[in-house]
Image: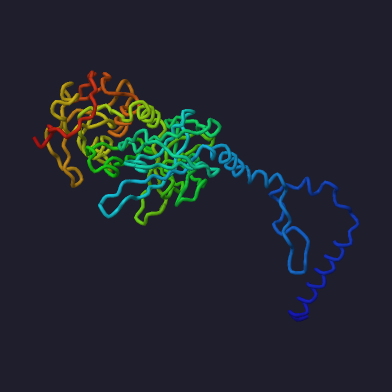
Amino acid sequence: MGRNDINKLMLWLCGLCLLLSACSTTPAPINAALSTPVESLPVSAGVDDGMGALPTAVPQMVIDAADAEYLLLANIYDRTIPSVVNIEADIAGNSATVNKETSRGSGFVFDMQGHIITSAHVIKDARDIRVTFNDGFVTSGQLVGVDTYSDLGVVKVSVELSRLQPLRLGDSDNVRVGQRAIAIGNPFGLSGSMSVGIISGLGRTLRSAALIDAAALPGFQNPAIIQTDTPINPGNSGGPLLNSQADVVGVSTAIRTESGVFQGVGFAVPTNTVKRVVPALIADGRVDYAWLGISVTPEDNGFGVAGLAEALKLPVAAGVLVRGVTVGSPADKAGLRGGTNILEIRGQPVCAGGDIIVAVNGQYVRSMDELVAYLVVNSQPGDTITLRVVRERQTFEVPLLLEARPASEGTTRDCAG
């Protein structure tokens, strides 16, 4: 018998087996479909139309589980969108040939007195402000105050109380990388838009004042900034960044981009900064920040205390290494010391030998950003704080009376003199 004959015989036997199986009189269990696990159902189970099996619909419970996140997002949108507004501000022109330019951004209701939070760069130097609610209602806004260091601003509107639905401010200290981040605003003027992502980083800094106001005193950063991969584009500035409980955890402020549109990294001012800055703007139209009067070597790229601990044989692996002390500053009056000698570390000059601040009021700090963030949120000029300082392997407490940030730079005493 040849190979072809064997193949024909095998095909005939297979056909016979299939026929006998199809003719079986054993009934299938009535609850067979219900007792079969969803994950074991074949993808192609269904009616054969001659072209192959058509997929059957998955059980409703699977659909409901898959749509649970979208149901949450839709609910958050419906609950918060009445509080989110579009802001247009006419800014005085920069030359005699330009009468005005229009700045556009977002904002959200802060309280029942009609105060609306937005970004300082949206409304700074505004002559006229128009506030548009999500239902299309337009009203004029009054500029209350701006703070370029935090990039926060406040506008006030006079409307019916039914329009004022303040959003709840959460505790930004509880934000963690990986948590859901929801931005609502008006990107490119498209009102009432939602975008979703995660918190992708914490503890960033922004040179907000330097970017907004050329006359701002240099050297002061906007600390504790939240980084997110949630799409944030022009027009989102001033809008809320929300968590899964619909609490505001940040105010959208900036994107890092070379093209002018979102490229994966956005930033938001944390709500604990908002809680410190906005009431001061409402009360006084300005914010006074506490000032230490110290400088540090830029801590990025591994030049903070943690990155220098081994190379400099430091007694601690976290804290703030003081490079210089401003003459006449609170730090100078408290006796803090800057660096004394320059060492080359990984090809970079580092001013070493200065005091290391490891804690403020009993709270340990790992970097200058954490120290500044603590002072921004928890202190004001005139407060006395206690610094824990390490000097030449000796640890001691230093009381320090905080002052307001000066209007101009002073002389710094460091390795340079």
Residue 28, image x and y in percent?
A: 85, 52
Q: Residue at x 78, y 45 (%)?
A: 35
Count the numbered circles shown. 0
Residue 179, image x and y in percent?
A: 49, 39
The N terminus is located in which quarter? Answer: bottom right
250 in relation to 398, above or below: below
Q: Residue at x 20, y 32 (%)?
A: 407
Residue farthest to the left? 417
377 in relation to 396, above or below: below
Q: Residue at x 29, y 30 (%)?
A: 371
Q: How is the image coloured?
A: rainbow
64 in relation to 155, above or below: below
Residue 396 seen from this side: no
Residue 368, image x and y in percent?
A: 27, 33
Residue 363 seen from this side: yes
Left or right: where does residue 141 sit relative to residue 208? right
The C terminus is located in which quarter? Answer: top left
